[in-house]
Amino acid sequence: MILLLLILPAGAGIIAFFLASDRLRRSLLVLTASAHFALSLLTWFFQPAPSMAGWLAEDALGKLVETLTSVLFFAVSFYAVAYLREEQREAHSDFEEGFIFSNAREASFTGCLLLFLAAMTLVAVSQQLALLWVAVEATTLASAPLIYFHRHHRSLEATWKYLLICSVGIALALLGVFFLAVAATNPDGSTTSMVVRDLSQNARHLNVPWVKAAFILLLVGYGTKMGLAPFHTWLPDAHSEAPSVASALLSGALLNCAFLGILRTQEICVAGGLAPFTDQLLLIFGLLSMAVAAVFILGQTDYKRMLAYSSVEHMGILAVGVGLGGAAVFGSALHMINHSLTKAMLFLVAGNILAVYRTKSTEGVAGVLAVLPFSGALWLLGFFAITGSPPFGIFLSEFAILKGALDQGQTLVAIIYLSLVAIILAAMAGPALAMAQGNPREPITPPVRSIALRTAPAMLAVGVLLFGVYIPPALTRVLREAAHLLN
Amino acid sequence: MAQVINSTLVLLVLSGFTLLGSSRLAACIRAVAFQGMLLGLLAICLQGANVTMTGLLLAVTTAAVKSVLLPWLLLRAMREAEAVREVEPLISFNVSIIAGAAVLILSLWLGQRLQLPSQPPSSLLVPAALFTCLTGMIVIVSRRKALTQVMGYLALENGVYTFGAAVALRLPVLVELGILLDVFVGVFVMGIAIFHISREFDHIDTDKLVALTDHLS
Amino acid sequence: MAGLLFSFILFGVGAVASLVFARRGRWSSFAGAGGVILGCTCGIFPVLHVVMGAPPQSLRVAWDVPYGTLYLTLDPLAAFFLIPIFLIASLAALYGTEYLEVYRGRKEIAPPWFFLNILTASMTAVILAHNAILFLMAWETMALSSFFLVTFEDEKETTRQAGWTYLVASHTGTAFLLVMFILLGRHNGSLDFDHLSVSSGSGILFALALVGFGVKAGFIPLHVWLPEAHPAAPSHISAIMSAVMIKTGIYGLLRVLTFLGPMQAWWGLVLCVIGLSSGILGVLFALAQHDLKRLLAYHSVENIGIIALGLGVGIIGVSTGQSFVAVAGFAGALLHVLNHALFKGLLFLDAGNISHATHTREIDQLGGLLRRMPATATTFLIGAAAISGLPPLNGFVSEFLIYLASFRQIVSTQTSSIVPMLASISGLALIGGLALACFTKAFGIVFLGQPRNECAEHAREVGFAMLGPALVLASGCVLIGLFGAVVVEAMKPLICNVTGLMSADVERDLAEAGNSIARIGAFTACVIVLVALLALARTRLLSLRKVSTAPTWDCGYANPSARMQYTASSFANPLTESFAMLLQTRETLTGVQGLFPDKAEFHSHTDDLFRNRLFEPLFHTIGRAIAVLRPLQQGRVQLYVLYIAVVLLVLLLWQIG
Amino acid sequence: MIAGSTIPLIIALTLAPLMQSVISRTKAIVAGRAGQQIAQPYRDLWKLLQKGAVYSDTSTWIFRMGPVVTLASLLLALAFVPFGGFHSLAAFSGDFIFVAYLMALGRFFTVAAALDTGSSFEGMGASREVTFSSFAEPALFLSFAALVRYTGRLSLDPVLAAIGPRAWASAAPVLSATIAALIIVYLSENARIPFDDPTTHLELTMIHEVMVLDHSGPDLAMIEYGAALRMWLFAAIIVGIAAPWRSGNRWVDTLIGLAAMLTLAVATGLIESSMARLRLLRIPQLLLVAIVLSALALAF
């Protein structure tokens, strides 16, 4: 079943490269997404058997990330099809600088999308750390072409930074994996396999300095991919230049996968009694990320960059939650879900706004509620959700994390956390509200666009609202298991 | 055997300095290729007596990819980009070499902080690996051309490999190959990117790639 | 409980229906208003039942969110606060059906109806909630829905600005509440209100509650959002927000007091200080305003101050063991909650009538409306007299109780606790005097004399839907003025609940206070009778004599024109001058020039002191401090990789070395 | 409610106008004029009642209500003031608060009536009235507080009853400070020099008088009578503190009280003829002095 989850998108991806007919390729995309979605839902009812000697298995954490990815991809695929249908084929002029540019081949875009899905699924299900590494690197390679869909210099620059910075980070992560392998060698030369469960089972016998070094390397390496400050530098560029479809997946799904890499290591370290050390680092980088996000959200004039930095903030929150440990980890896991749904929705809506207003500057956009009532409403909903006001999911998860902090007497952390969240709210409220409300600068007549462009974000919005008022017991159970893995 | 390993590692370090020191792209590429070859050698030597067929094959493929395929990719990219054949560093070569020296000391120190649990084939192994990684980083940070940054990345990878070689025997073949494939595709994609960059800006200086910053009010 | 649950359903139906009928003309108004009115009416019965002394009812259902339970409780405290909410909300809804009509065609009027239903529902939920998560959710939903109502006229820049301020302020307040509830729930895991308790450091929790709820209630200096948001909103929304929504802050404070264990004297002291500063500064800023609704908004700050003062006196009474002081103080505060709801709702609705009829809220543009809008004028007069705390109206009764409590404390203790009492007495007196000045100005300039421009000239009285609510509220003011004793007697259970005093003592003291109030009721009735008799006598006299009309005595000036009438600004000038240091009014004067001066101009504007001198500087400092880090992200990929390298090395050296 | 008698009320209603005439007579004598007859105020009232009325055509029913409400509230307020040996007609704990606010009610309507005419002069007067009264209120309440704290009673009648010669022996400073404060308030509330000059003829300088420029006939009568009652009310309270001798026989006590009222009136007259009107800006400062005095009374 797990293999199926992998082979399905991978195969479809390869086929997509060679399919001539757009219609066929698009339907292939949607079909694969739906099948993958259906499969991952099945895994909630029938626990899939581990395969490849336990290298591929779906524990609670993996299940969360995998399902989340699948859900997002499902919603996004509809959007993508509509988006591709409406994208101009021939060369067209860039709305910011006016030069002429053309898009990449749709075939390769679709193909990469599917391969991207395959890679992310692999990240979620692989229990073997080296394999995990391979998968993470694969996500980078599969997603780079997505960012460079619009063939112009800005997206190229973004792609280059993404490639280089992430590759460097990932290389360090590989070193970390090797370090861990070293740590796993007992003095007599015998070794434990690199499968997470085995490692955490005899984590007590691991060689401490090497584990520490390994954790640092993996934190920096995967942290780069996850967008923890100060390694986040590629993130705003990539998210703002990629087409909204890609931005949604990058922010909603990819970052979680990278975080999963860190969580696996954390799992081992916690089992090895190194929690104080790792928690300390996670807290530092988490709060740092939130602070950096605050710095750049304040006075931000590009709304896609604003969303990107908000992703940095929420990655920080995830790290803080895990770093706090205890009840906060549950909150962190829940937060991962809420953030992914909300942020993906916001990026898709941003895509709609961008398509109509043809500018990414917050000053350029006004009166979305008047021009695009539905998207405008979703935008406001997303804004309130992402800034953590009830009745949306993020409120609950942020509350849980805060409670964790205060219950453990981490008052300082709690204060910094709260004040940063408050600053970011105040900073985002200005532009986000100004965009939605009021009247457009010059009268705009919105073009008639495909319904899918509204339904896709709406699907996610339902989730955002649902998890704010009701968390299904099954989900709670899995979240608890996941939290238990990290405590 | 130990002498071979040690001398290989020394050569590795020297090639690192060449990478830092040489002013011509081609020379740098050759340095990186040489590192690749050394890696192959190292992999074989580290297996020592109980050398297996797969181990041998892996070492050879690695060496081939790293010392032939990737450099060829880079040379091709260089030709397509019609880049100036100079390295154009942000900091002078002397400074880079001094930095290299500093890094060497650092990695030696770290090396003896981090003792391999099992008896290491050579005390130089860890320092050399770390040093190579860090030289790669220095190159990325201190050079202008996108191409040089790829070389830096390769050097970094080589460093990681050097270390990998020490523990590689315990990594399954499949993973080894996966890693190799990733690196290869990575460099391949970067090559394409460089090609596009040169076509877009008709040069490959990354300090022109600064359009994307925050225009904050 | 069932009734209340049903009213929740009705609110929901109303909300949805108003959106469904969005394209069906007035249907959506009827649907929205219907939801609110029906919901409130069927909610009021269980509430009254509990107020009459029925046992508290509650409902607890498990809820699949972390720490959350669907736990509603209708106890006397909740019931007391629900009465004004239901009353004002339903009246405002009725008012809205006519008020919003002018926007039809220009704007979508379904959303305000949707959010009005949500707002009413969430306010009800806030009062009923007995679990922290539920409370916070309702609390924030209340903030959000009211935010959307405030920004109804979002085409105006000022409105959007007000919305931003309101949003940020209320979220910041909520942050404090989060911390408070978490700390309260720390001991025994659950966040149900029954389990909230505090072992040590109740002072910190009180401070947190004070700030968190103070933002909503509008304590100075946390009031900055209030004078922006209330004028921006449509008038019936301003009425709801000012009359009942900000009271949820007071409710929260009282509710939390029941968790905090024994009250400490300094809490009362702090509340007295806050109350006095809010009261005095609030009315002073109100005096300086030219915009009628802004003036009313500042008066909300003032009245919240009076309420806080009452609470402070009460708490001091509790902590010094003076049960009468405690009872009278709390009773006064609670009664003022009710009274303020009545007359402030009334005044905002009338302000709505005025702007509806004249299209301006500038006091100095109006005048002579009494002849043109008699019903509005009369109700406004009643409201004005009530808010100035004059007998025979309700405002006096509650202020009297607070006075009485303070005087009693002076009599019965020799301790230092009389200093705040003296402060509260003289403060109340000053507030009373200033409020009188402010509302003689508001009423006199707006309704009396001659109209100052065409709009006022051609104003017409508004329709029934907009007058009816005002009439109801006005009669409410009179009734409580006469029969306040009844209300006070009914407060026994909730005062016991909040103060934790012996039921017997509370009963005795309430009886004593009620006695005075009953007398006041009787004597105010006498005033009314006397007035009637004198008026009668006067008419009888004049009926035998010659009664003629003439132009106003102009002290010899040839032909006075309407523009020569005393303006609001000049009326308030002596007072604003004496407090210029606090008000910092900006004045621009282009005096007469030349031999034959054609035109001279004078403008004055009074910004909010705390906004200008406290919060804006604060925000700027934060902004500047943050801006220092901006160069981090300046596009050079080399630099970015350098960050990675440096951080990596630092970590390795720090942890391994 | 204490079993009170109507006597203080009757005395007030009948003799109130006398105070003003005594004051003006004193002023006249000091100024070396013959001055008006003692009964002149009654004549004026009677004459005004005979007259018809002229109303400004901008004015409304508010204008007509002004005098009525003012007079009504004062009539009721007087019911709480004891005089001489006689208890007040009514009393309940906290009644002095009620009295103060009744006068505020009167002020509200007087001011409204003034604004109703739309005359800028009357607006000016109204503005000054509300300004000064809002400074006078705290002084009044603080002096009440001083009395309440000293006597331990919460109602006007018992408070005054509790102040006897012994009280003066024991707490002279408290009482004298309070009286000083009350006298200042009494002067300002009744628009006497140094706050306002009732006999001035320049509208620009008036405070109270200018507000009633447009009233005529019976309305004016009510206003004049109301003014007299207000003065009596304050005077009665002051006298109640200042002349606390009790002989046991109520009528004697009442005579003592009347004598005291007379002296107070004469004193007022002397003050008025001995000093000039203050500049408007100075008035709040004098009222602040009153506040300070009553605070002092509390400090003792």
Image: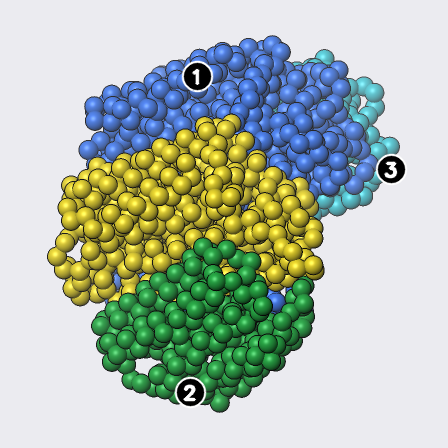
Which chain is assigned yellow?
Answer: A
Residue at image coords 63%, 24%: C331
Q: Which quadrant of the rendered structure holds the C terminus of chain C?
A: bottom right
Q: Please tell me the colour of chain B.
A: green
Residue at the disc numbered 2: B22
Q: Please tell me the colour of chain D.
A: cyan
Q: What chain does mark 1 sit on? A: C
Do badges 3 and 1 share one subunit?
no
Q: Position of residue A89 (x, y in %)?
A: 14, 54
Residue at image coords 42%, 57%: B178
> Mark 2 falls on what kind of element?
loop
Residue at the disc numbered 1: C7
Q: What chain does mark 3 sit on? A: D
Between C308 and D140, the one lying in front of the other is C308
Which chain is assigned blue?
Answer: C
Q: Amino acid at mark 3?
A: Ser
Q: Dot 3, how many residues are within 10 Å of its Cα: few (below 14), some (14-19), or many (20+)?
A: few
Q: Amino acid at mark 1?
A: Ser
Compared across the picture, whether C129 is left or right of A390 comes to right
